[in-house]
Amino acid sequence: MEQISPSSLQDLLLSEDFISKWTKNRILHFDLDCFYAAVETRDNPALKNVPLAIGGPPNSRGVLCTSNYLARSFGVKSAMASSLAIKKCPKLLILPPDFKKYKAASREVFDIFYQYTQKVEGLSLDEAFLDITDLCATSLASNVAREIKKKVFQQTGLTISVGASYNKFLAKVASDWMKPDGFYVIPPSQRQRFMQELDIKYIFGVGQKSRERLNAKKIFKCSDIQRASMADLKNLFGSRYLDMFYMSHGIDFRRVDGEGERKSFTCELTFNDDVKDYLTLMQRLFRVYGEWYGRFQKWQSNEDGVGPNVSTLVVKVKYFDFKQTTHECRFRGDYSFVEFQKLLEYILSKRSEPIRLLGLGVRLGKTEEHTQMTFL
Ligand SMILES: [Mg+2]
């Protein structure tokens, strides 16, 4: 069997068409600076030069929700036990949270977001993604970001950090880059340069433990992941390896908005000429796969909770004479290209005639495994 070599595989995964497609959106990430503490300080300016935290009292088993930057300079952190925080910063003032007040302030800020777009995904009271792609037909993302930031301060008295980029991952990295009161833009043109040096800790899903595990294997920067072979990535990340590969290159398929329920998720490609040659067919299948994978990840990331219930993987073939067939196998947790390759090979073993269309994807729901090899 002819194989696609590892280097050409990476080229296929990062083709120019593919990259330009996944760098077209304009996404903002907003994050209010030490939100609860900021609201308290806004309402009582005397707190401005006091190390301040919001949370439970130190004599109970209380923990901190947030703290201001002065308190942080003493080593005080969110989610720290209040008793430990007091040890680190004896002058720390801990106020009980007033969620009614924070919710009101949050609503004011979100109302400003909704003046610009309906595609607002709130992550918490003080954090949200905005998809402003439509707006950017006429305005620059950086101008929209700056305008919203200014409006939030003028109307609520709160500073907000904002990051602008072409996906969620980098918008969030950008909002954190110059925090507090931050403003940072990562345009598509900076993708390669920016990703080279970026610490892996910024990658969505890489927590403290994964970071230590990866550092032990001499993986510190995104460029270290970029350099790794697909086999190594599979070993390191398991079923998430393609996501990690793409994220290390600054590509993130998650979307900001939701969609309705669906029964399958597939992609198809109709060829200009009918194709019979094995290698050409595999390359075409790979193209459909790349397209499908990207769209599926983007859609999947928007599903709440556990994500879609994938029952089977499916490949569909339409021959030169418009007869078509599909072949499916039960989903076993692996979306990799090889799984679809096997399905196509099975179809070809039954009928090897010129092909005009290839499709692949997944069926969702509780369908039993079945094979439909009728040549309609
Ligand atoms: Mg915040």
Image (cartoon, rainbow, N blue to C red):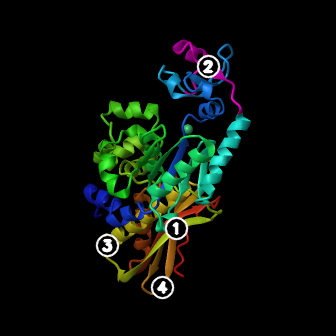
Residue that label 4 marks: 322
Q: Kindly identify the amino acid type of the residue bearing the numbered disc 2.
A: Leu
Quadrant of the frame with the N terminus: bottom left
* Residue 131 placement (x, y as % from top left): 53, 58
Segment colored magenta = 78-98
- The reply to whether dot 4 and dot 2 touch (C-beta < 8 Å) is no
* Residue 219 placement (x, y as % from top left): 32, 37
Residue visible at 47% across and 73% down in the picture: 268
Residue 272, placed above or below residue 141: below
Q: Which of the two marks, 1 or 3, is nearer to us in this view?
A: 1
- Is residue 264 magenta-colored? no
At mark 3, the secondary structure is helix
- Is residue 88 magenta-colored? yes
How far is mark 2 from mark 3, CA to CA? 68 Å
Q: Residues within 10 Å of mark 4 (few under 14, many from 20)?
A: few
Q: Kindly identify the amino acid type of the residue bearing the numbered disc 1.
A: Thr
Residue that label 2 marks: 93
How far is mark 4 from mark 2, CA to CA? 75 Å
Residue 54 versus residue 146: which sits nearer the camera?
146
Q: Which of the two marks, 4 or 2, is nearer to us in this view?
A: 2
Residue that label 3 marks: 280
How far is mark 1 from mark 4, CA to CA? 19 Å
Earlier residue among tags 1 and 3:
1
Residue 39 versus residue 270: which sits nearer the camera?
39
